[in-house]
Amino acid sequence: MNIYQDISLQEAEAMAAQPDAIIVDVREPWEFEEFSIGGTNIPLADIRERRTELLPYQTLIVVCTNGTRSRVAAKDYCRTEAFQEKQIFHLKGGILEVED
């Protein structure tokens, strides 16, 4: 089983600049519209049915408000066979750390 890693905002921004990386924001669309650090919005409830959108990327950086939903999503991606060779990261503390 793949294991995700916690990262800081600075690490997330550096990784997201790579062409094979994507930020996956698992908050609800209204939360994403209110404040975002970029990336693609895939609400937690939709992560399983929208996995194929992420297959082209080698690095996934999963974010949410405080880190709870993104931790659930990161664990789910790690358990998925199609993502076993991918690098999966979790923004520690969520975007609340960014807004301060």
Image (cartoon, rainbow, N blue to C red):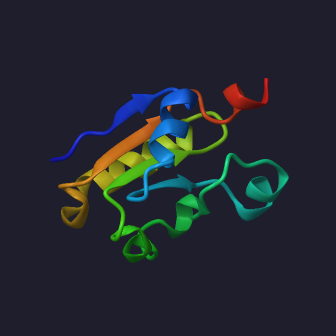
- The residue depicted at 55 percent of the width and 38 percent of the height is 13
- Identify the residue at horizontal 38%, vertical 58% (top origin): 20
Q: How many marks?
A: 0
Residue 33 quadrant: bottom right
- Nearest the viewer among 26 and 35 is 35
For the question of whether residue 92 can be seen, the reply is no
Side of 54 where 99 appears, left or right = right
Viewer can see residue 43 = yes
From the top left corner, tell me how far across and down residue 83 is, in percent.
25, 60
Q: Quadrant of the C terminus?
A: top right
Q: Residue at x 41, y 29 (%)?
A: 6
Task: Residue lying at the far right in this picture: please name it.
Answer: 34
Residue 57, percent across and down? 36, 63
Residue 84 location (% of width, % of height): 19, 56
> At 46% across and 74% down in the image, what residue appears?
50
Residue 12 percent across, percent down from the top left: 50, 37
Task: Say above or below: 83 vs 48.
Answer: above
Depth order, front residue of 50/39? 39
